Amino acid sequence: MARDRTREQPDREDGELKEKLVGINRVAKVVKGGKRFGFAAIVVVGDQKGKVGHGTGKAREVPEAIRKATDQAKRHMIRIPLREGRTLHHDQKGRFGAGRVVVRAAPPGTGIIAGGPMRAIFECLGVHDVVAKSVGTSNPHNMIKATFDALQHIQSPREIAARRGRKVSEIIGRRGQAETKEAKE
């Protein structure tokens, strides 16, 4: 049963938060009188300005599972620094379990080149240009957690400059010099 697990939930905007339903899984428990069905939902929530979170919820009914997942996602939101409000500052690798992901900054006009759960994360985060690749498992739980692992390790030039005791212009200047050296060679 190969189905697209990223279902388009009508994007609900409450308090400027965008919710994306990544997947719903139906599980059955066999009991004396037959089967009892339960549902597990994965949701990604973001403000499209650099804050994003994910959550899972389990319940006997689909709407209740989605509500629980959304509440958990809102409680566990993290802030990710974005370059020019449209892409990441640098390339990063993330891993969780058997899931490995590579996220790369992209020039303007590239769009979101990512599949499944990663696309939902970048749309909720507010990233407009990114290239991402999942290596290994296609399990949405592991892909989401690996993507969040990669995003948590992204640092802005301001954070790096503060840690090194330098100015931001020195850090960015080096990046520009390195790019021009590569272009000359």
Image: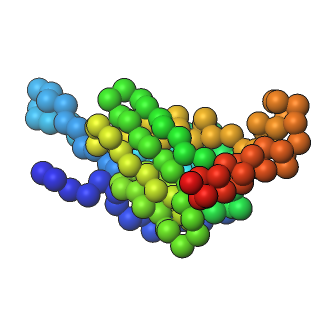
Relative to 121, residue 86 above or below? below
User: For residue 27, what is the image quadrant?
Assistant: top left
Which residue lies at the image location 82% right of the left edge and 38% below the top edge?
161
Closest to the observer: 21 or 107?
107
**Count of numbered tags:** 0
User: For residue 13, what is the image quadrant?
Assistant: bottom right
The percent coordinates of residue 67 (x first, y second) are 49, 48
Which residue lies at the image location 56% right of the left edge and 54% below the top edge?
185
Relative to 174, residue 32 above or below? above
The percent coordinates of residue 18 (x first, y second) are 57, 60
Q: Is residue 22 visible?
A: no
The percent coordinates of residue 98 (x first, y second) are 32, 29
Colouring of the image: rainbow
Horizontal side of 85 relative to 110 (left or right) equals: right
Which residue lies at the image location 42% right of the left edge and 29% below the top edge?
96
Closest to the observer: 95 or 181?
181
Which residue lies at the image location 48% right of the left edge and 41% below the top edge?
147
Horizontal side of 110 relative to 7 (left or right) equals: right
Q: Is residue 106 visible?
A: yes
